[in-house]
Image (cartoon, rainbow, N blue to C red):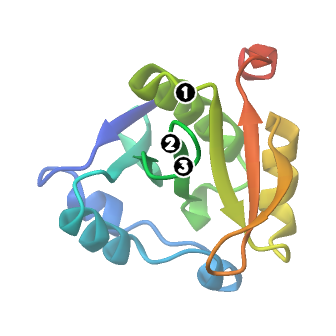
């Protein structure tokens, strides 16, 4: 496994749009097309593909919200691994790679995400990596999780 993050552009857009989650996961995340549309309307959003060599295996969308908290918050807002690539370690390794990318890009020690409490697989993955619930709930009713990068040893394997 050799994962990289690539910005989405006209050359790889169709590959990324071809990624699909399982039917049972469709209510947990917006479609990639909806995400790309949202990102095209607001320049703070970053959309990226997660690749294993030249094969697109996942998608993520993230941003820095300067109007949240004292100094703003970095959100890993959307993340998915395509159904045919699930269960192969791409989720854990993809999240770790994204966390490192977000830290390099923004320099914030805390990264936030939100998850529906019925999405047990995602919650288990996020907890394994080091995210914990902070007691907040977002506008869609998702529970907020945060990782503190002062404790980064869980990202190094």
Q: Is residue 15 above or below residue 116?
A: above
- What is the crowding at mark 3: few (fewer than 14 residues within 10 Å), some, or many (at least 20)? many
| Residue on which the image places disc 2 | 72
Is residue 17 shown left or right of residue 123?
Answer: left
Q: Is residue 131 above or below residue 120?
A: above
Q: Tell me how far mark 2 sits from mark 3, CA to CA.
A: 10 Å
Mark 2 residue element: loop
- Quadrant in which the C terminus appears: top right
Residue at position x 56%, y 30% in the image: 97
| Residue on which the image places disc 3 | 75
Is residue 136 shown left or right of residue 41?
Answer: right
Mark 3 or mark 1, earlier in chain: 3
Do the numbered discs 2 and 3 sit on residues whose CB atoms are within 8 Å?
Answer: no
| Residue on which the image places disc 1 | 108
Do the numbered discs 2 and 1 sit on residues whose CB atoms are within 8 Å?
Answer: yes
Mark 3 residue element: strand
Foreground mark, 2 or 3, reads 2
Is residue 9 shown left or right of residue 6?
Answer: left
Residue at position x 57%, y 72% in the image: 21
Residue 78 in the image, given as x and y percentages of width and height? 52, 60
């Amino acid at each position: 496994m050799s994962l990289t993050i690539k910005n989405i552009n006209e050359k790889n857009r169709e590959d990324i749009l071809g990624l699909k989650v399982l039917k049972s996961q469709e209510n947990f995340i917006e479609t990639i097309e909806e995400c790309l549309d949202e990102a095209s309307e607001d320049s703070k959003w970053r959309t990226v593909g997660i690749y294993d060599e030249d094969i697109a295996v996942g998608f993520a969308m993230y941003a820095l919200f300067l109007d949240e908290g004292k100094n703003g918050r970095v959100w890993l807002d959307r993340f998915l691994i395509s159904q045919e690539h699930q269960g192969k370690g791409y989720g854990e390794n993809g999240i770790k790679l994204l966390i490192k990318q977000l830290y390099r890009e923004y320099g914030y020690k805390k990264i936030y995400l939100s998850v529906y409490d019925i999405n047990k697989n995602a919650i288990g993955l996020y907890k394994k990596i080091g995210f914990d619930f902070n007691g907040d709930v977002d506008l869609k009713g998702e529970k907020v999780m945060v990782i503190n990068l002062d404790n980064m040893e869980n990202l190094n394997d």
